[in-house]
Image: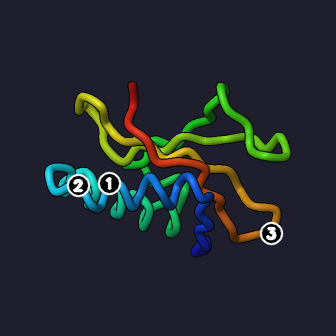
Amino acid sequence: MKFTLNYSDLAKDNLKDLKKEAHLAKRYKAVIKALINLADNPKHPSLQTHPYYSVFGPSGEKVFEAYAENNTPGAYRILFYYGRVRGEIDILMITSHP
């Protein structure tokens, strides 16, 4: 099942900021690839998707973390939850791992 990705305003800003920084072009490409994998299969092995317990969706939804990068300092992560409508994923934020 292919999922539709919906982006929060924060996630849109995160992606836009990542795209405009030339020195982050490689990271932007990794994030785009991860988003494609997420839409195709949220359990894709490269995403290493797992629950993220520190944050909840706006209505208390369970949030998951997917890896855009791994074994990289400041690797990017995608925080998302499953939408209220079947077949939708809501992207909360796209951020670097501390």
* Secondary element at image label 2: loop
**Of callouts 3 and 2, the N-terminal one:** 2
In-front residue for pair 79/58: 58
In-front residue for pair 90/14: 14
- Residue placed at 59% from the left, 63% from the top? 7
Residue 75 drawn above or below residue 16: above
Q: Is 63 positioned to the left or the right of 27 in the image?
A: right
Residue type of the residue flagged with mark 1 = Leu
- Quadrant in which residue 8 is drawn: bottom right
- Residue placed at 61% from the left, 71% from the top? 3
Callout 1 touching callout 2 (CB < 8 Å)? yes
Residue 95 drawn above or below residue 12: above
Residue type of the residue flagged with mark 2 = Glu
Disc 1: which residue: 18
Callout 3 touching callout 1 (CB < 8 Å)? no
Q: Position of residue 85 (x, y in %)?
A: 80, 69
Disc 3: which residue: 85
Q: Residues within 10 Å of mark 3 (few under 14, many from 20)?
A: few
Q: CA distance from mark 3 to mark 2?
A: 34 Å
Task: Tell which tag, 3 or 2, sits nearer the viewer.
Answer: 2
Residue 86 drawn above or below residue 65: below
The circle on residue 54 is: none
Q: CA distance from mark 3 to mark 1?
A: 29 Å
Disc 2: which residue: 21
Image quarter where the C terminus lies is: top left
In-front residue for pair 21/45: 21
- Residue placed at 68% from the left, 50% from the top? 81
* Secondary element at image label 3: loop
Q: Is 66 positioned to the left or the right of 46 in the image?
A: right
